Image: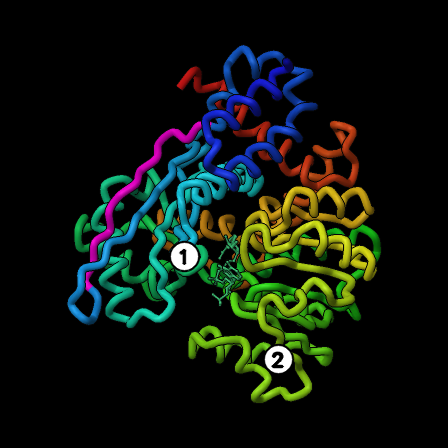
C-alpha cells in the first residue's frame, strides 16, 4: 500500500464518525499523491500523519441565561489545527449544525487556504451549536460573553486569532471582543472582523465576496473575456453572497438568484441588492419578503426546485457545505455553465466538483477562491500590530493582488504536476508545499 493510501485508510479508521472531515481530508490527500510519491522526505518525516491530526482540540461548555430566566447550555469548540507558518487563524461558526466533524473539516481546509494567501497564518476554526436566529440582542450578547469567558484561555494576538463565519458577524465579534478586553485588560488584535472604530480593517466586510469575483475575473482576463453581459447564479444571502453580488454587478454581470435556508429567488432582470441588504442585514428577515417589492421575481421554497436549475454562465455557491450535488452539477453543465467559483467552504460535493472538471467547466475550489476573507483578516492583524490603518483603496488593491497571485500560483502548481487547468489540485499542492516545508524545517513537532 502506498503512502497516501495508508494515510487515507488510517484517517478513515480514526475518524469514521466525521463525514465532513473525511471528505475534506480525502480530497486534499488524493491531490497530493503526485507530490509525495516523488519525494520521500515527506514519508520519512511522517508529515501526512501529522498534518491530518490537529495540534489541539478544545471543547467546552457554554452556559447562558435566556430572557425567560432559563439556563441554556451550548457546546463550544476551537480546533487549533496547524501553526507551522503562523498563529492559528480561522472563523467561528454559530449554527445548530455545528459539530466536531464540521469544525475539523473547516480547520483542515483553512491550513491550505491560509498558506495560499502568501501571509504568515496557520489554520484553525471554532464555533458552537448555538443558533443566533430568533434570539434577542441580549441573549446573543450573553451567549457571546459566556463563549469568550472560556475561549480567552486559548487565544491571543500571537497565538490564535478567530474571525467570523456563518452566524458570526460584526455584532457577535463586537460582544466577544468586549468580553476579551474586560477579562485580559489588553486592547490587541485578537479577533478580526472588528468594527472600524475599534481596530477593524476597511474592505474586510467585502473581502470574501469581492475576492471570489476578483479570482474569476482574473481567469476571464487571462482568456480575453470579462463579466460584462454574463448571467450569474449565486446562492446564500449572507456576507459572502451579498458582496459577491455587488462586485459582479460592478463588473457588468447580472446576478439572477440568491438563496437562504428556506428558499430561493429568481429575478431575471437582476437582483436589487439594496432590497436584499435591507431584508438580510438590517431586518434580519427572510428572502421570501423580496417579492413584496419586486413582483416580477419568483420565490421558491426549499425542496421546490433548486437554485442550480437556472441557465447561467457562472455559478457561485456562497451559502454552506455540500449545497451543490452531482445532480445539480449535471443540470448546470447541461445548461451551459462555463465557470463555477466556490464562495462558501466545500459547497460542492466531491463528485459534483469532479463532474465539473471532467466536463471542462473551470472550477475554483473555496480554499482558493474564498481566501480573500482570511487574507484581509491577516491584513487587519498587520494594521493592528502597527497601530495603523490603510485606506479602502489600499486594502482593496492588496486583495486584488492576492487573488491574482493565488490564481496564478494554483495554475502553475497544477501545470508543474501535469494537472493543467485543475485548480483543486493546483490549490491543494501550492498550499501544501509551503506548510510542508515549514514543518520539515521545524523538526518532528
Ligand atoms: P452568513 O451567515 O452571513 O450567510 C450564510 C448564508 O447561507 C445565509 O443566507 C444562510 O441562510 C445560508 N445558509 C447557511 N446555512 C445553510 C444551510 N444549512 N442550508 C441552506 N442555507 C444555509 O455566512 P457567510 O456569508 O459569512 O458564509 C457563507 C459561507 O462562506 C460559509 O461556508 C463560510 O464558511 C464561507 N466563508 C465565509 C467567509 C467570510 O469572510 N464570511 C470567509 C470564507 C468562507 P439564512 O439567512 O436562512 O440563515
The span from disc 2 to disc 1 (Cα, nearest Å) is 27 Å
Residue at 34%, 53% in the rendered image? 387
Q: Is residue 156 left or right of residue 412?
A: left
**Residue linked to disc 2:** 272
Residue 171 percent across, percent down from the top left: 35, 65
State the image quarter where residue 144 is shown. bottom left
Tell me if I can see residue 96 in this picture.
yes
Please check the rendered image and state whether residue 4 is part of the magenta-colored stretch, yes or no.
no
Q: Is residue 29 left or right of residue 181?
A: right
**Residue linked to disc 1:** 95
Residue at 45%, 36% in the rendered image? 122
Query: Between 41 and 31, which is closer to the camera in this rendering?
Result: 31
Residue at 68%, 35% in the rendered image? 425
Q: Residues within 10 Å of mark 2 (few under 14, many from 20)?
A: some
Query: Between 83 and 68, which is closer to the camera in this rendering?
Result: 68
Q: Is residue 207 left or right of residue 245?
A: left
Q: Main SS of the magenta segment?
A: strand
Please check the rendered image and state whether residue 64 is part of the magenta-colored stretch, yes or no.
yes
Q: Is mark 1 within 8 Å of ligand 1?
A: yes
Residue 184 percent across, percent down from the top left: 18, 48
Height in image: 330 above or below 368? below
Magenta residues, start to end: 53-65
Residue 229 percent across, percent down from the top left: 79, 70
State the image quarter where residue 37 is shown. top right
Q: Quadrant of the C terminus?
A: top left
Provide the secondary structure element on which disc 1 rests. loop
Amino acid at each position: 500500500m502506498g503512502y497516501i493510501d495508508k494515510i487515507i485508510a488510517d484517517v478513515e479508521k480514526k475518524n469514521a464518525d466525521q463525514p465532513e472531515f473525511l471528505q475534506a481530508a480525502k480530497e486534499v490527500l488524493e491531490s497530493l499523491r503526485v507530490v509525495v510519491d516523488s519525494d520521500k522526505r515527506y514519508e520519512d518525516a511522517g508529515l501526512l500523519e501529522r498534518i491530518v491530526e490537529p495540534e489541539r482540540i478544545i471543547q467546552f461548555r457554554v452556559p447562558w441565561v435566556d430572557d425567560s430566566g432559563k439556563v441554556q447550555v451550548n457546546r463550544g469548540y476551537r480546533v487549533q489545527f496547524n501553526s507551522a507558518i503562523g498563529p492559528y487563524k480561522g472563523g467561528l461558526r454559530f449554527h445548530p449544525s455545528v459539530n466536531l466533524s464540521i469544525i475539523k473539516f473547516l480547520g483542515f481546509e483553512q491550513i491550505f487556504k491560509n498558506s495560499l494567501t502568501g501571509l504568515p497564518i496557520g489554520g484553525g476554526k471554532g464555533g458552537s451549536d448555538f443558533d443566533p436566529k430568533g434570539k434577542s440582542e441580549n441573549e446573543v450578547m450573553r451567549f457571546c460573553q459566556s463563549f469568550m469567558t472560556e475561549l480567552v484561555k486559548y487565544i491571543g494576538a500571537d497565538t490564535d486569532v478567530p474571525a467570523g463565519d456563518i452566524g458570526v458577524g460584526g455584532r457577535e465579534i463586537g460582544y466577544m471582543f468586549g468580553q476579551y478586553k474586560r477579562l485580559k485588560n489588553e486592547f490587541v488584535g485578537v479577533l478580526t472582523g472588528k468594527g472600524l472604530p475599534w481596530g477593524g480593517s476597511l474592505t474586510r466586510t467585502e473581502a470574501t465576496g469581492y475576492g471570489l469575483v476578483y479570482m474569476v475575473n482574473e481567469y476571464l482576463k487571462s482568456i480575453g473575456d470579462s463579466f460584462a453581459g454574463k448571467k450569474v447564479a449565486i446562492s446564500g444571502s449572507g456576507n459572502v453572497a451579498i458582496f459577491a453580488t455587488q462586485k459582479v454587478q460592478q463588473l457588468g454581470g447580472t446576478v439572477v438568484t440568491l438563496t437562504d435556508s428556506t428558499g430561493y429567488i429568481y429575478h431575471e432582470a437582476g437582483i436589487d441588492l439594496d432590497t436584499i441588504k435591507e431584508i438580510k442585514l438590517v431586518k434580519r428577515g427572510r428572502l421570501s419578503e423580496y417579492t413584496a417589492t419586486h413582483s416580477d421575481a419568483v420565490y421558491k421554497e426549499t425542496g421546490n426546485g433548486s437554485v442550480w436549475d437556472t441557465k447561467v454562465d457562472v455559478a457561485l455557491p456562497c451559502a454552506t457545505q455540500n449545497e451543490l450535488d452531482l445532480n445539480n452539477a449535471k443540470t448546470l453543465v447541461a445548461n451551459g455553465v462555463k465557470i463555477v467559483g466556490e464562495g462558501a467552504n466545500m459547497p460542492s460535493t466531491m463528485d459534483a466538483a469532479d463532474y465539473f472538471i471532467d466536463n471542462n467547466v473551470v472550477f475554483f475550489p473555496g480554499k482558493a477562491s474564498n481566501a480573500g476573507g482570511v487574507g484581509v483578516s491577516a491584513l487587519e492583524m498587520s494594521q493592528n500590530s502597527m497601530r495603523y490603518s490603510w485606506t479602502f483603496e489600499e486594502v482593496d488593491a492588496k486583495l486584488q493582488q492576492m487573488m491574482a497571485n493565488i490564481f496564478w500560483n494554483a495554475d502553475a502548481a497544477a501545470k508543474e504536476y501535469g494537472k493543467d487547468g485543475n485548480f483543486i489540485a493546483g490549490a491543494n499542492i501550492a498550499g501544501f508545499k509551503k506548510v510542508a516545508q515549514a514543518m520539515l524545517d521545524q523538526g518532528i513537532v
